[in-house]
Structures are given as structure tokens and as C-alpha cells.
Amino acid sequence: MNTAARSDVLVVGTGLGGLRVAEHVRDLGHTGRITMVGEETHLPYDRPPLSKQLLTGAWQAHQLSLRGPADFEALGVELVPGQRVCALRTGEVETTDGTVWSADSIVLATGVIARRLPGQPESALSLRTIDDAHRLRAAMEQARSLLVVGSGFVGAEVASSALKRGMAVTVLESAATPFARTLGAGVGDICARLMREAGVDLRTNAQVTGFSDPSSDATEIHLADGTSIGADVTVVGIGGVPDVGWLARPGLDLADGIRCDGSGRVLGLTDVWAVGDVAAWQDDTGTFRRREHWTSATVQASVVAHSIMGVLPPTDKPPYVWSDQFGIKIQVVGHTDDADHVVPLEGEALSGGQIRGSVIGYVRNDQLAGLVGFGAARELGRLRPTLTRPMSHSR
């Protein structure tokens, strides 16, 4: 019998990635102990609906749960919520209450912490957890206006949810266009147009220099051009910082997450893996990449589970992420952040035409490396199999 099947597995973190690791090792025949230890007091829940269904009131909190207590019992997983891990040693971790948990295989899935601006007051809210979503939802119920700092997926989705509530929405973006770093300026301009056409007051090249009146419920923000802006509710959505402070040790590179090889093994540690937002996996070019997306966490969890069990992982698939905002589903497949150029494959959004139904291709080394679709699920699905194939020059 495979000795890995009888080993003890410890997952640090109770989010999607950690849960999927536990499920997969069981599916692969694991019969040993599995323990999940995490700081949050809630059962594992789905995060994408936080900025959408939960924030608009369409869903209640219980609808986000990924597993109930009976499911964990049936799965044979001991769930230990409300305990923060503060130290990692060979074959064991320690929580802040002094408890030591030992295991043959340890999986780090601690996620990220909301990035904050210098001097950010408590009245400027963040959205990373279900508790954050409850606070923001309660604040929005009594508000008429919303100010969002950051126009990434979370910021855009919060803005979209606020519009559904009838609020006046302003979004501040420090760059010249949203998503310029990940999707490029041309597609970023499409995202900007989508926001503005929906009714968002999007202000680009907006550099935040400070806040005023930190004791007030209404936060006013100062900008580098000398202007100030305020709203009934302010949300800062400028990404996350990997939760790795407790891991600091000589020889372990934690500059941007936990560095891992292509199977999720943490470099410099033995029998330790990492998945999800906190993990920087090495790709086939040797680059370490963190991908803060739902699908990445699920794919990585499967790979790690196979690695723990000593069996070959499933065939790798191109990265995929989606975002529902302003009545359109934006879908991103493959690699879009290092393309040589982009080409219109469907629709006229790149040339200023209708956004819905458009698909843009990202070309690298004369091959189609990535796709972005705007309300074009069918068209994108048809084009998806062409990824990594040489591009035709007939268009």
C-alpha cells in the first residue's frame, strides 16, 4: 500500500484551496488523518459572491458555505477554526494558543490580507472576508454614495453592486486605465468604458496622498492634484498582501508569496506545499507567479494532492478567471500579461464599438497565448482550443 495514503496531512488555512486539497487526497485513497487549522471562525465559504450576491442582498451568508459540519465528519477532516498559526517547524506548526499540530505533509493555504494605503482610517473599508462583506453591506444599506479606491475585479464588482442599490459611485484608479498591467492598455480602455457607460464616475491617474478626519464615519480622500473627494462609504480595493509574516526565516524567499516549484512544493522546505493566493508557483519559463483567482486555487489543490499521494497530476490547463460586473461576464483564459500585441477575434470593442460579444486575443511569439471575452461565453468557448497555436496572418 502507498505509505502516503496512511500519512497525516495538515492544512493551514480553511479557504477554498485548502479544502480542495483535503477533498482530493481523500478521493485519491488517503486513509490517514487530515486536519485543517485556520484563523477565520466561519466554515469554509466561497469568496467570489462576497462582492456580488452577498453585497446586493441576493444571497444570505449560509449560501456561501462550501461544506457543512456533517460534510467534514463524512470526509474525515478535523476542522479547527479560530486558530492562527504563528510558527512552522519541520513536521509541525504551532498556533497562537500554544497548541502544536504535527503531520507528515503540511499544506500552506493562508491566502492574503487586504492591502492598505498609508494612513488609511478604519472608516475606509476593505473586502476580503465574509465579515468585511457584512460590514460593507450594512454601511451601504444606509448610504447614497460610494467611493472605491482601485478598479480591479473586486473594486469593479463592488461598484457594480452599489449601482444595483441605486448608489452614486466614484472609482479612483492610480493608473491611466484599469487593468493596464494584466490586460494591457487597449483592453483596459474597454473596461473603463464599461464602467463609465454603466454610470460610474471613473477617475484615472488619481494618486491618493492622504485621508482627512479619521474619526468621522465619512472618509474624505486627498489626491495629488490638490482635490479632495468623499462619499458616504469608502472602500479600498487595491489587492492583497500574502499572509506570510509568520513564516519569516533565513533562506526562505517571501518577497511576493511563498515560492514553490511546479508541483506546489515550497522551495527550501521538506514535505511542505502551498496553494492559492499565498503561493507563487514556478511556471515553465522559470517565473514565479501568484494567481489570486478561484480557478487557480482549485487547480493547484488537485496538483498538490496528487504530489502528496505520489501520483501523476492531471494535465495542466490554461489559467482561467471571470468577473461579473455591470451586467457582463468578463472571462480571461490563458496568459495576458506578457503578450507582444492584441488582436480582435470577435466583435468591435477594441475599435470603440459594442463591448458585449467581443473577444480579444493576446499573441506572444506568433502564438495565441490568451483570450479575454466580454459577454461572449459561446465565442470564447469556441476559440479556447486554439490557445498556444500559431496565429494566422489572414485577418
Image: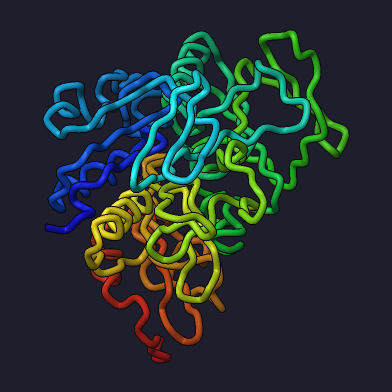
Instruction: Give whichever of 330, 132 is nearer the camera.
Output: 132
**Is residue 45 in sight in this rendering?**
yes
Relative to the observer, which residue lies in front, 358 or 75?
75
Q: Report x, y in % for residue 256.
A: 61, 52
Can you say whether 122 is above or below 196 in the image? above
For the view shown, which residue lies furthest in the right direction? 226
User: In the rendered view, does 378 fall on the left or right side of 128?
Assistant: left
Decide if residue 155 is on the left or right side of residue 348.
Answer: right
Residue name at image x 54 percent, y 51 percent? 258
The C terminus lies in quadrant: bottom left
Please state if 110 lies on the left or on the right of 313 as rendered.
Answer: right
- The residue depicted at 42 percent of the width and 47 percent of the height is 276
For the question of whether residue 239 can be seen, the reply is: no
Left or right of 73: which side holds 210? right
The x and y percentages for residue 23 are 21, 43
Q: Looking at the image, is 19 positioned above or below residue 5?
A: above
On the image, which quarter does residue 320 sit in? Answer: bottom left
- The residue at 48%/51% (across/down) is 279
In the picture as drawn, the residue positioned furthest to the bottom comes out as: 393
Give the x, y percent position of residue 246.
59, 36
Seen in the picture, residue 16 relative to 353 is either above or below; the reply is above
x, y percent for residue 382: 24, 69
Q: Quadrant for the N terminus, please.
A: bottom left
Instruction: Name the residue located 46 percent from the left edge and 64 percent from the top edge.
Output: 261
